[in-house]
Image: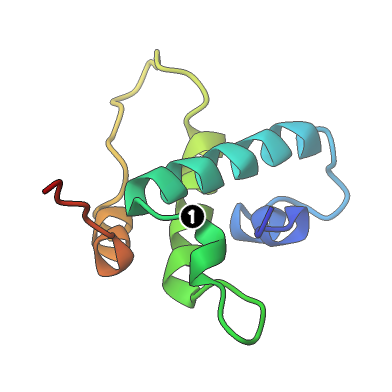
Amino acid sequence: MFTTLSQARKFCNIDDDFHADDDVLLHFIEAAENATEKNLNKPLYAFVGQDGLLPATIRQQILILVSTFYENRECLSPTQMHTLPKSFDWLASLDRHYHIPR
């Protein structure tokens, strides 16, 4: 995984002393990284720079998904459901690779 539990906890504004959701967050991190990789049509490791990190735009995409998954765990809700933030789509479009079959 490229995203740490600590990064996800901080992005989701989870208190330092609350650890009941750590396993769920780890699952969301894995799902978000897989989804981002599929959305970009290229393995995440291909984007790793010389500093050993993913570009900030890709790290942000992953964290947006993690927080969205965390805040919206169920498909049924007494309130209105929303789609992914437009910022995710825009960030993903910056690095997306398109394959055109010959």
Q: Position of residue 38 (x, y in %)?
A: 40, 44
Is 95 left, or right, of 53 in this rendering? left
Q: Residue furthest bottom?
A: 50
Q: Secondary structure at mark 1?
A: loop
> What is the image's colouring?
rainbow
Q: Residue furthest front?
A: 102
Q: How many marks?
A: 1
Q: Residue furthest right?
A: 17
What residue sits 51% from the left and 36% below the top? 69
Q: Position of residue 25 (x, y in %)?
A: 69, 39
Is 101 left, or right, of 97 in this rendering? left
- Between residues 75 and 41, which one lies in front from this camera angle? 41
Mark 1, Cα crowd under 10 Å, few <14 / some 14-19 / many 20+, is: some
Q: In this figure, which residue is indicated by the disc labeled 1?
A: 43
Q: Position of residue 23 (x, y in %)?
A: 78, 33
Q: Amino acid at mark 1?
A: Pro
- Between residues 28 and 9, which one lies in front from this camera angle? 28
What residue sits 73% from the left and 58% below the top? 4
What residue sits 60% from the left and 52% below the top? 12
- Between residues 29 and 50, which one lies in front from this camera angle? 50
